[in-house]
Amino acid sequence: MRIEKIEDKCNQCLLCVRDCVAGVWRIVDGKSQPVDIESCNRCSHCIAVCPCDAILHDGLKKDQIVRVSRNNLNPEVFRDIIISRRSIRQFKDTPVPRDVLEKILDLARYSPTASNDQNVSYTIITDKKLIEEAAKSIWGLVSRLYDKTKKGIGKIIVNVTGLNNHRYLRVMDYCQKQTVENGRDFILHNAPVLILIHAPRRARFAADNCNIAATTIINYAHALELGTCLTGLMNMSLWCNSSLRRKFGLPQDKKVYASLVMGFPAYRYTNTVSRKKPEVQWL
């Protein structure tokens, strides 16, 4: 890897030194110089902070680096995106164009990762039959487990533990009826797209990296008039169901830490929603 400074462009502001957390850039004889090049984690901060375009770094793609347009950084627009976003569980029967999905994934790669590992990867399922099969498989297991809570030892356990009052158990009779009568999918919501977000199994902060990427996808999708919903039961199923992992062709060395469905919402929300105040401790 080669990192160099173009001396006749440099204004000696030393921002590259001040902002380099890896200690690659240091002050030598009063000037900034790349010293410990092997410690560079390719975070791009030196190039991003340099006001003079005075740094050459062959470990980074120059064509991806553009000037920041401050006029586009509108906090009110971002606030509206956040407070108007909803978890969508009713979708139109309309496929999401591949170029739109690629546009979303292209932005997701800018999500922060620990130590700039950039180790988040994706499996995108648009095969409606495959999505339906996975949903039915998971729902079948959930439904069978629920049926066991209504008699015998299962009923005794949920009564003793107080789980009989759990909101998910209380609604199960209704959900089972809706599934049979209306074909309602309470797992993947008849969505046209399922996105599995994974990272190396033993990577540090892998779950954090994947969920940050998921948040980026969710908010950008909403700005593109798409809807999403996180699907925790899919995560749990993939952790313990090797058959389902094989069906999705998941790499053996990767673990799914976040999954979500996506599509065009069946209807729009006219208003924002109510949220409780955060619990905050000031020190």
Image: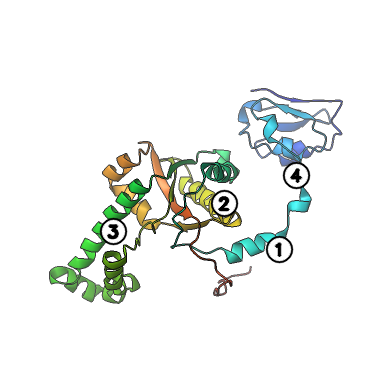
Distance (Cα) linking label 4 and label 1 = 18 Å
Question: Which residue was labeled with disc 4?
Answer: 68
Q: In the image, what residue occupies the spot 78% across and 37% down? A: 50
Residue under pointer 1: 76
Q: Position of residue 68 (x, y in %)?
A: 75, 44
| Amino acid type, mark 4 | Val
Give me the C-alpha separation between circle 4 and circle 3: 46 Å
Colour approach in the figure = rainbow
Q: Between disc 2 and disc 1, whose residue precedes?
A: 1
Question: If you read the primary sequence from the N terminus, does the residue marked by circle 4 or circle 3 appear first?
Answer: 4
Task: Work out whether mark 3 precedes mark 2 in sequence or the reverse, and give the earlier one.
Answer: 3
Point out the frontmost of discs 3 and 2.
3
Q: In the drawing, what numbered circle is on residue 97?
A: none
| Disc 2/disc 1 C-alpha distance (Å) | 17 Å
Instruction: Please give the name of the residue rendered at 26% of the width and 75% of the height, measured from the top-left corner.
Output: 164
Q: Which mark is residue 139?
A: 3
Using the image, determine if residue 86 lies above or below residue 98. below
Q: Indicate which disc, 4 or 2, sits on the residue closer to the N terminus.
A: 4
Mark closer to the observer (4, 3): 3
Rendered-image quadrant of the C terminus: bottom right
Mark 2 lies on residue: 216
What is the crowding at mark 1: few (fewer than 14 residues within 10 Å), some, or many (at least 20)? Answer: few
Quadrant that contains the N terminus = top right
Separation of residues labelled 3 and 2 (CA atoms): 28 Å
Going by the image, does 143 lie left or right of 218? left
Q: Residue at image x 24%, y 58%?
A: 140
Which amino acid lies under the numbered mark 1 shown in the image of this protein?
Answer: Glu
The amino acid on which the numbered mark 3 sits, given as a three-letter code, is: Trp
